[in-house]
Amino acid sequence: MNQIDDLLLFMKVVEIGSFFHTAKLLKISHPTVARRIKNLESRLGISLLRVSTKEFELTCIGQQLYAILKEQSGAIDVLLQEVQNFVKPKDEPQGTLKVALPTVMSIDLITPYIPAFLLKYPKINLIVRYQNQNIDLIKDGYDLAVLDHIPTQQSLKIKNIFNSSIRLYCTKTYAQKNGLPLSPDDLANHLVTGFMLADDKIPDKVPIINSNTGMVTFIDMPRRIVMNNAFHSIKLLQSHEIICGCFDNTDPILTSNDIIAVLPDYHFMALKYYMVRHPYSNDLKTLVFCDFLEACLSSGVKDLK
């Protein structure tokens, strides 16, 4: 095993934060990882890690070496990709991808187009986990994910690919029976869904933002029914008895002729989605799936049908 391989292994151990999880990711044994790091330290004549029973920390020289390697890793990725494209320009993307996707947003914007992706790339296998909780791409072995937050792992490759806002909607039947609120304060006279925060707390006040001016008005949080899932708001909406907060561009039902935007110049909180890639997932199958996701979440989605 040459020294460059062991330097790259050292980088992975630092970024993953565990000999065990590095071994699991690379499909080698835990003792092999430890031995190769020790051999690297012996060849360099320096101590890179201080290892205890269950964890390790970088020495000062280890921190400096990691910083140098990290700075150069982007250029190495580009070089390797160019070599792969030159040597194997006609290779088909192939292999297994493990991805995590947001549960609700994917229902209409991503999942319906997955069969077309699989037909286009017959040598790619997908393992898809729909979830909304925090995950650790590196330790859990995911190639990429779409998340509604920026993860704490700094080594991941992150790109904002989709934005959505909560807006209010009702059906025409509701509007005919009850009329429509003309201002944020008028919402107090209607049955409106409230929402809880990620930590299950329900604030007393909620900001509603004028999309044209940016002006923020605080109104009382509706309390008759409070929810944590916008997908179920769609079902409530179809009862014709309630005004619901829904993410504005995640469900085709919201564009139907029967649905009316309530206070169309206003929105509640905005939500950003990020495409997050494992730092070592740079192969062709990952890149084509990244392109697929961006097409799903943009006007290019029609080309996938």
Image: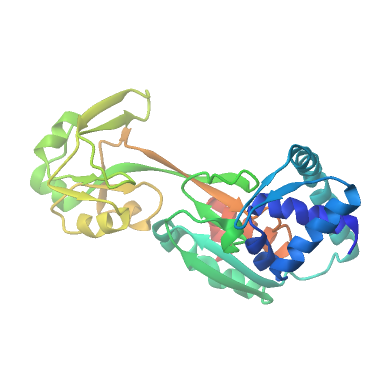
Q: Nearer the viewer, residue 268 or 264?
A: 268
Q: Position of residue 224 (x, y in %)?
A: 12, 47
Q: Nearer the viewer, residue 211 or 67?
A: 67
Residue at the front extreme of this rendering: 53
Q: Position of residue 112 (x, y in %)?
A: 48, 67
Q: Is residue 270 above or below residue 133?
A: above
Q: Quadrant of the C terminus?
A: bottom right
- Residue at the spot x=63%, y=48% of the render? 156
Q: Position of residue 215 (x, y in %)?
A: 33, 22
Q: Nearer the viewer, residue 253 or 83?
A: 83
- Residue at the spot x=39%, y=58% of the render? 104
Scheme by which the image is coloured: rainbow
Q: Quadrant of residue 131?
A: bottom left
Q: Quadrant of the N terminus?
A: bottom right
- Residue at the spot x=58%, y=71% of the render? 126
**Residue 92, visible in the rendered structure:** yes
Q: Quadrant of residue 239?
A: bottom left
Q: Is residue 98 above or below residue 147?
A: below
Q: Is residue 70 left or right of residue 2?
A: left
- Residue at the spot x=71%, y=71% of the render? 29
**Residue 82, visible in the rendered structure:** no
Q: Nearer the viewer, residue 34 or 99?
A: 34
Q: Is residue 305 above or below residue 276?
A: below
Q: Quadrant of residue 201?
A: top left
The number of callouts visible is: 0
Q: Is residue 254 left or right of residue 69?
A: left
Q: Position of residue 21 (x, y in %)?
A: 63, 62
